[in-house]
Image: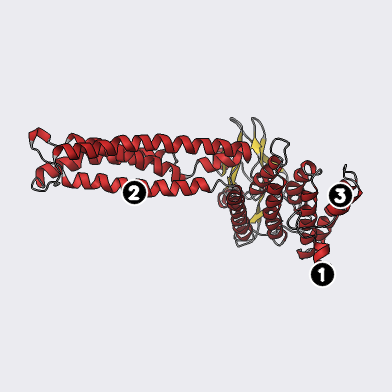
C-alpha cells in the first residue's frame, strides 16, 4: 500500500464510523448515556477536534523542517527515504481521524433536544485521542532518529541486510556460478534485443525467477545489459536473448524488470554505500566542515566492505533446475565496491589528517581480514594510492607523518602507538 493511502484509510474509517455508530447507539443503545452535561460534552468534543487539528499542523510543520534540514546536512536521496516513513503517515491519519470522528460525535450531542450524550461514541473519541498521543510519541522518536549517529546506523543496517539477503539467495539453488571464462560465445548468437521505451527510470530489482522461466521456455539465455540501480533512458538496450529457438514476447520480459523513479535497497548493495558516501562528502564540504562525521561514515563503510569481502560477489548467473545457464546480469566486482566506498571521500578528505588516518585504518583492517589474497592485494594497492595522496597533500612533514598512522578514531589513538604499548 502506498504511504499516501494510509491517512485516507483512517479518515474513511472515521467518517463511516461517525455516520453509523451514533445511529446504532440511538436505535439500540438509547438507554446508555455519558454522565456529563450537554454543555460539558460539547466543550470537550470541541476541544478534542480543534486541538487535534492544531497538533497536526504543529507536528508536521516541525517534521518537514527537520526533513528539510536533513536534506541539507545529509543527502536528498536519503531524506526522501526517511520522509516516506509510514509512522508519519499513520500519525497523520490518526490525528485527522480523531478530528473527523469528534465532529460527527458532536453533532449527536443533545440530538433532537434529547439532552443525551452518546456514551460509546464519546468513549471512542477518548480512545482515538490516546492512540494519537501514542503515535505522537512514536513520531517524536522517529524524528530523533534523524540524528547523524542514528542515520548512519540505519543506513548501515539496511546495507547489511541487503548484502546478507542478496548473496545468500543468489548463491543458493536459484543461482549458480557460471563456468570460468563464461562469455558471449557460450550463449550462442543474439536472437532478440529488447530496448527500453519510456521516461527515465531506475532498475529497482530483477524478477530472477520469471526471467529464468522465460529463458527456459525459449531454450536460450537472457543477458541483462543493465544492472540493478542503473537508470534507463529511451532507446537504451535492456537485455539480449541468446540462442533462443523462438522470440519471446517483450511485455513479460519488461515486466520482469521492476522499475522505479529512484533506486532502492533491494538487490542493490551499492545503494547503501552510495548514501553513506553522500553523507561523508557532504560532511567534508567547506559549508559543513565536519570530518568527524566522515570518520563515523567510514566506520559503517568498513563494516559493509568486510561483509562484501567475505561474500561470493560473482553471483550474476542464474540457472534452471537442470543446471542450464539461463540468466546473466551485471554485478559489481570487489574493486567496484572499494572504489565506490573510498574514492570520493579520499578526494574530498585529502586535506583532513583525521580522515586520512581513519581511511588507512580501514584499508589495513580490510587487507588483514580478507581471506581472498586477490581482494587483500586490491586493498593494499589502494592503501599505496592513499599514501601517494598524503605525500602530495599540502600537509607539512609532521602532518604527513601523523596522516600515515592508521587510527580508528581519526584522531585518537594511533595503531602504531597501541602496538608499541
Quickly name the residue at label 2: 131
Q: Which image quadrant: the C terminus?
A: bottom right
| Vertical relation: 306 (above or below) 64 | below
Q: In front: mark 2 or mark 3?
A: 3
Give x and y (percent) for residue 343. 78, 45
Q: Quadrant of the N terminus?
A: top left
In the depicted structure, whether residue 371 falls above or below residue 345: below
Q: Earlier in the sequence, mark 1 or mark 3?
A: 3
Residue placed most toward the observer, 3 or 227: 3
Q: Residue at x 85, y 53 (%)?
A: 402
Relative image position of residue 96 (x, y in whole percent) = 34, 38
Marks 2 and 3, the one that precedes in the sequence: 2
Q: Quadrant of residue 320?
A: bottom right
Residue identified by numbered label 3? 399
Residue 225 visible at all: no
Q: Position of residue 291 (x, y in %)?
A: 72, 46
Q: Secondary structure at mark 3?
A: helix
Residue plotted at (13% across, 47% down):
35
Q: How is the image coloured?
A: secondary structure
Query: Is residue 2 rendered to the left or right of residue 33?
Result: right
Report helix, strand or loop for mark 1.
Answer: loop
Q: Which residue is outermost to the bottom?
A: 421
Near mark 2 (Cα within 10 A), the count class, few <14, some 14-19 or many ≥20, is: some
Whether label 2 touches label 1, CB < 8 Å = no
Q: Quadrant of residue 231?
A: top right
Mark 3 nearby-residue class (10 Å; few <14, some 14–19, many ≥20) = some
C-alpha gap between disc 1 and disc 3: 22 Å
Q: Nearer the viewer, mark 2 or mark 1?
A: 1
Q: Residue at x 12, y 46 (%)?
A: 33
User: Residue 421's mark?
Assistant: 1
Name above or below for residue 309 compared with residue 289. Answer: below
Amino acid at each position: 500500500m502506498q504511504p499516501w493511502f494510509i491517512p485516507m484509510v483512517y479518515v474513511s474509517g472515521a467518517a463511516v464510523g461517525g455516520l453509523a455508530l451514533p445511529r446504532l447507539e440511538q436505535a439500540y443503545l438509547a438507554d446508555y448515556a455519558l454522565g456529563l452535561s450537554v454543555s460539558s460534552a460539547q466543550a470537550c468534543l470541541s476541544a478534542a477536534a480543534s486541538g487535534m487539528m492544531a497538533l497536526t499542523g504543529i507536528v508536521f510543520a516541525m517534521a518537514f523542517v527537520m526533513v528539510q534540514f536533513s536534506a541539507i546536512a545529509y543527502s536528498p536521496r536519503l531524506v526522501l527515504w526517511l520522509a516516506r516513513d509510514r509512522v508519519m503517515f499513520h500519525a497523520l491519519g490518526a490525528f485527522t481521524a480523531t478530528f473527523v470522528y469528534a465532529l460527527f460525535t458532536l453533532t449527536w450531542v443533545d440530538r433532537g433536544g434529547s439532552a443525551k450524550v452518546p456514551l460509546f461514541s464519546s468513549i471512542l473519541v477518548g480512545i482515538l485521542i490516546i492512540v494519537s498521543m501514542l503515535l505522537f510519541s512514536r513520531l517524536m522518536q522517529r524524528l530523533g532518529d534523524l540524528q547523524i549517529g542514528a542515520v548512519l546506523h540505519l543506513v548501515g543496517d539496511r546495507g547489511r541486510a541487503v548484502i546478507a539477503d542478496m548473496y545468500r539467495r543468489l548463491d543458493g539453488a536459484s543461482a549458480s556460478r557460471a563456468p570460468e571464462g563464461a562469455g558471449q560465445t557460450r550463449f550462442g548468437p543474439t536472437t532478440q534485443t529488447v530496448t527500453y521505451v519510456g521516461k527515465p527510470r531506475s532498475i529497482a530489482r530483477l524478477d530472477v525467477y520469471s526471467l529464468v522461466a522465460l529463458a527456459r521456455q525459449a531454450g536460450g539465455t537472457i543477458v541483462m545489459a543493465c544492472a540493478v540501480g542503473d537508470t534507463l533512458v529511451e532507446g537504451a538496450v535492456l537485455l539480449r536473448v541468446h540462442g533462443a529457438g523462438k522470440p519471446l514476447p517483450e511485455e513479460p520480459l519488461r515486466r520482469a524488470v521492476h522499475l522505479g523513479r529512484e533506486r532502492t535497497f533491494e538487490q542493490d548493495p551499492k545503494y547503501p554505500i552510495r548514501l553513506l558516501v553522500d553523507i561523508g562528502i557532504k560532511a567534508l564540504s567547506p559549508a559543513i566542515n565536519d570530518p568527524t562525521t566522515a570518520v563515523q561514515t567510514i566506520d559503517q563503510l568498513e563494516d559493509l566492505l568486510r561483509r562484501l569481502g567475505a561474500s561470493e560477489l560473482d553471483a550474476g548467473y542464474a540457472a534452471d533446475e537442470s543446471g542450464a545457464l539461463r540468466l546473466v546480469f551485471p554485478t559489481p566486482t570487489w574493486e567496484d565496491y572499494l572504489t565506490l566506498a573510498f574514492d570520493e571521500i579520499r578526494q574530498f578528505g585529502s586535506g583532513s589528517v583525521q580522515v586520512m588516518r581513519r581511511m588507512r585504518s580501514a584499508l589495513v583492517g580490510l587487507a588483514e581480514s580478507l581471506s581472498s589474497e586477490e581482494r587483500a592485494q586490491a586493498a593494499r594497492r589502494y592503501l599505496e594510492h592513499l599514501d601517494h595522496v598524503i605525500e602530495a597533500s599540502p600537509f607539512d612533514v609532521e602532518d604527513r607523518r601523523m596522516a600515515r598512522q592508521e587510527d580508528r578514531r581519526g584522531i585518537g589513538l594511533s595503531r602504531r602507538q597501541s602496538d608499541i604499548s
